[in-house]
């Protein structure tokens, strides 16, 4: 039925290649959801095949499959060569379980960021985002930070050497000991009002420069996105997302939801005239069919309809099956422990094994029946959610439908409806998320339930931060006692350094990093609990909450305790002292941990141990596939790290200007470690959209109010006055954060993607990461099986077309 990619298969079989497309080598990427592969793939077999797992692992390398004719000939010549390495032997092969091809062009470590565009616009924009943050720090340093450091060191006289107070009574909280930490801080010139007044003027200049820079960032971001969009095509370019579809089967043609909707959309799209280029293409296609003596068939403008279902029953059956498989693995482990051969009849015919296998097959039969129902689109009233992804032959048709029927949420709130009326109901027409961006299992969650879950999520996050604050307070209390001991020692004439103060400062800085890591893991679980409908929504929520929570834990809680509880800003073991150690630890420890990459090392170790077991391995094929995949890249955690660093440095830049240099070095290190990991040690599971980067720019703008508010605070603390420049800076920073700067940028700098609207989907599909049928768990098994057949036919047709046009 139409839920399968049968339309794709049809136009692949009837493919017509114009001169440009004949020169375009094949490039096919795969999707993310691995529910069970194709119907014939032994995803749950025990023992597993290590050869299949190796193929799966290679298929998930970060790269593209673009086989030139020279490479194809080389592979054909070396087909029977024993000297050909395993990697070359796997190039171009398709993994049956995920329908992904092994790439032969791995991404280079030092590649241009545009080279990541096949992973979605969000991937190259992530690296551009880090570069933008580095540029921000450099501008802050050049406009005000360098002056701050120079005047602190050269003209600051507020901090004193401890030797000058030998035998005197000192206040450990208000006495600023001159050392490498305090000398470059604002505390060293806290009595120099003339320097601080000029510093505030430079801070205002820095603020204005950053506001202008943000507009430049947005403009470049949009231009970058438009350029990538014009050069790369995705399944979403040919698809619309329909909501509010009637779920009552009454009046459906043959009771078939997807066929009825497909016929309706095919009829509706006919009211839009075809472009001359499309008419020319179809005439050429007919001529080709006549020349090759094939039946002349018209291309349908609607290619496929993929319905969205409530997948709870499917997931419950999957969980039941996994429970039975776990029982089977325990039984096999006991049998292998008794010395029995895994391939012997003793094992295969063991009563416990046969019984559990029978139960597993029963569950698999129920899953196949359910999937068949989903694919046919009949008798699915209790599952169908009233949502569907409709894929078209031409991108131009998608744009025409969106222009005519797209209604914003605000417009819908005021009663405006689309003109697309299906069975008496106005449909909601939206631009679709990418196939890998959809959380198919969460589409049935109601808005009310999501709001409730998110309120619970924020409550849990707040409780965690309170606990973290208690731990930091405990460390600060211990440190305060040590500082008091040092003050008493100075009074006695003992000037030896109190190592306890330094050790606790270092422990506190490391503990903050550890707490942040635990905080990130907990918030990740909270974000999963919130049940977002898209991966982008989940990533934005996780990055925003995680970065803000880590910022509060790293900067705000420490600041609050030092300011209002221990009341120690620049004394021994005070805020300036501790936070400098935090910046240094944060600059190197996370980067080193990333570079060492315990996840990759553990995978290598477990792969080695599992391979030694051979046919005594009790893992299923899917479990072994998961083991052979590299660790998954988490863009939300990566953004959270960068954002947290930017928030913290903005908070302390005026009092600890050295933090600008330290954080800049940390981000440069982070940038190259990320590029190395993605190129060699990561699996990219999702096609990232530009929306993530756009939202992260919005979050990054919070740097401005944080920066200007702390500038004002430190001026008030040290001079007990507030300058006009500080007030102006706050107004500008807060205003920039509140106003819709993205929309303002769009009105200031108009730009439009130059997309080839006239490329048919059969030519564009070879560059897709995946499609909706292969990603929807309801149709994934059948769709992935058909995709492999379709690609093989495409290869055969490509060779035929090359001969016809003299390119062989």
Image (cartoon, rainbow, N blue to C red):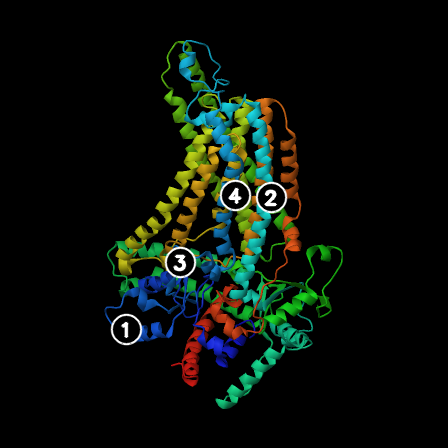
Q: Do the numbered discs 4 and 2 sit on residues whose CB atoms are within 8 Å?
A: no
Residue 609 position, x and y percent, is: 28, 53
In this view, 631 is above or below 189: below
| Mark 1 to mark 3 CA distance (whole Å) | 40 Å
In terms of depth relative to the viewer, which is nearer, 604 or 612?
604
Query: Where is mark 4, residue-wise?
Result: 136
In terms of depth relative to the viewer, which is nearer, 763 or 623?
763
The residue that appears at 28% across and 54% down in the rendered structure is 608
Q: Secondary structure at mark 1?
A: loop
| Mark 2 to mark 1 CA distance (whole Å) | 58 Å
| Mark 4 to mark 2 CA distance (whole Å) | 10 Å
Q: Secondary structure at mark 4?
A: helix
User: For residue 73, what is the image quadrant?
Assistant: bottom left
| Tag shown at residue 78 | 1
Closer to us: mark 1 or mark 4?
A: 4
| Tag shown at residue 282 | none
Closer to us: mark 3 or mark 2?
A: 2
Query: Where is mark 2, residue-wise?
Result: 211
Closer to us: mark 1 or mark 3?
A: 1
């Amino acid at each position: 039925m139409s839920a399968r990619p049968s339309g794709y298969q049809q136009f692949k079989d009837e493919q017509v290649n114009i001169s440009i497309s004949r020169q375009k080598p094949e490039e096919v990427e795969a999707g993310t959801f691995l529910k069970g592969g194709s119907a014939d793939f032994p995803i749950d077999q025990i023992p597993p095949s290590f050869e299949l797992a190796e193929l799966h692992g290679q298929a998930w390398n970060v790269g593209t499959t673009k086989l030139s004719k020279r490479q194809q000939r080389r592979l054909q010549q070396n087909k029977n060569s024993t000297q050909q390495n395993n990697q070359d032997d796997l190039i171009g092969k398709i993994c049956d379980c995920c329908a992904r091809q092994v790439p032969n062009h791995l991404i280079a470590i030092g590649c241009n960021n545009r080279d990541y565009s096949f992973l979605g616009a969000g991937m190259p924009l992530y690296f551009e985002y880090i570069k933008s943050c580095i540029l921000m720090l450099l501008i802050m340093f050049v406009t005000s930070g360098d002056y701050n450091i120079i005047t602190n060191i050269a003209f600051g006289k507020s901090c004193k050497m401890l030797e000058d107070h030998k035998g005197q009574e000192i206040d450990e909280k208000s006495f600023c000991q001159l050392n490498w930490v305090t000398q470059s801080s604002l505390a060293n010139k806290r009595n120099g009002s003339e320097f601080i007044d000029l510093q505030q003027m430079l801070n205002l200049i820095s603020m204005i420069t950053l506001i202008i820079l943000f507009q430049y960032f947005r403009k470049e971001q949009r231009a970058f996105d438009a350029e990538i969009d014009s050069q790369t095509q995705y399944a979403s370019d040919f698809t619309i997302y329909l909501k509010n579809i009637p779920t009552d089967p009454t009046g459906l043609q043959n009771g078939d939801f997807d066929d009825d909707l497909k016929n309706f959309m095919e009829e509706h799209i006919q009211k839009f005239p075809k472009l001359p280029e499309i008419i020319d293409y179809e005439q050429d296609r007919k001529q080709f069919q006549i020349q090759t003596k094939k039946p002349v068939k018209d291309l349908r403008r609607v290619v496929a309809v993929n319905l969205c279902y409530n997948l709870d029953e499917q997931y419950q059956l999957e969980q039941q099956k996994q429970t039975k498989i776990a029982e089977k693995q325990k039984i096999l482990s006991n049998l292998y422990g008794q010395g029995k051969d895994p391939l012997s009849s003793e094992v295969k015919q063991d009563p416990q094994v046969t019984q559990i296998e029978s139960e597993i097959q029963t569950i698999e039969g129920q899953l196949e029946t359910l999937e068949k129902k989903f694919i046919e689109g009949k008798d699915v009233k209790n599952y169908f959610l009233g949502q569907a992804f409709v894929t078209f032959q031409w991108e131009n048709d998608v744009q025409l439908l969106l222009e005519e029927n797209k209604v914003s949420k605000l417009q819908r709130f005021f009663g405006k409806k689309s003109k697309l009326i299906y069975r008496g109901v106005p449909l909601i027409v939206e631009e679709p998320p990418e196939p890998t961006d959809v959380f198919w299992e969460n589409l049935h969650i109601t808005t009310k339930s999501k709001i409730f879950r998110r309120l619970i999520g924020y409550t849990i996050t707040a409780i965690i931060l309170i606990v973290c604050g208690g731990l930091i307070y405990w460390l600060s209390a211990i440190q305060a006692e040590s500082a008091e001991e040092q003050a008493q020692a100075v009074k006695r004439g003992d000037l030896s350094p109190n190592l306890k103060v330094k050790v606790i400062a270092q422990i506190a800085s490391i503990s903050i990093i550890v707490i942040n890591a635990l905080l990130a893991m907990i918030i990740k679980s909270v974000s999963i609990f919130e049940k977002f409908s898209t991966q982008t929504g989940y990533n934005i929520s996780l990055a925003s909450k995680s970065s803000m929570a880590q910022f509060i834990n790293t900067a705000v809680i420490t600041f609050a305790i030092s300011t209002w509880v221990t009341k120690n800003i620049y004394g021994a073991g005070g805020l300036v002292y501790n936070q400098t150690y935090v910046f240094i630890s944060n600059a190197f420890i996370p980067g080193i941990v990333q570079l060492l990459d315990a996840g990759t090392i553990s995978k290598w170790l477990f792969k080695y141990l599992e391979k030694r077991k051979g046919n005594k391995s009790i893992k299923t094929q899917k479990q072994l596939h998961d083991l052979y995949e590299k660790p998954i890249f988490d863009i939300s955690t990566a953004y959270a790290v960068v954002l947290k660093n930017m928030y913290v440095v903005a908070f302390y830049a005026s009092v600890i200007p050295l933090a600008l240099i330290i954080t800049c070095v940390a981000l440069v290190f982070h940038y190259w470690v990320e590029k190395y990991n993605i190129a060699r040690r990561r699996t990219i599971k999702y096609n990232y959209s530009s929306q993530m980067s756009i939202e992260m720019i919005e979050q990054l703008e919070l740097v401005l109010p944080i920066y200007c508010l702390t500038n004002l605070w430190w001026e008030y603390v040290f001079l007990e006055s507030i300058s006009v420049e500080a007030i102006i800076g706050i107004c500008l920073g807060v205003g920039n954060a509140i106003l819709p700067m993205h929309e303002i940028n769009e009105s200031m700098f108009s730009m439009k993607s130059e997309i080839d609207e006239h490329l048919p989907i059969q030519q564009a599909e070879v560059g897709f990461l995946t499609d909706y049928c292969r990603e929807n768990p309801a149709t994934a098994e059948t769709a992935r099986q058909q995709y492999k057949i379709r690609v093989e036919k495409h290869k055969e047709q490509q060779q035929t077309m090359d001969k016809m046009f003299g390119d062989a």
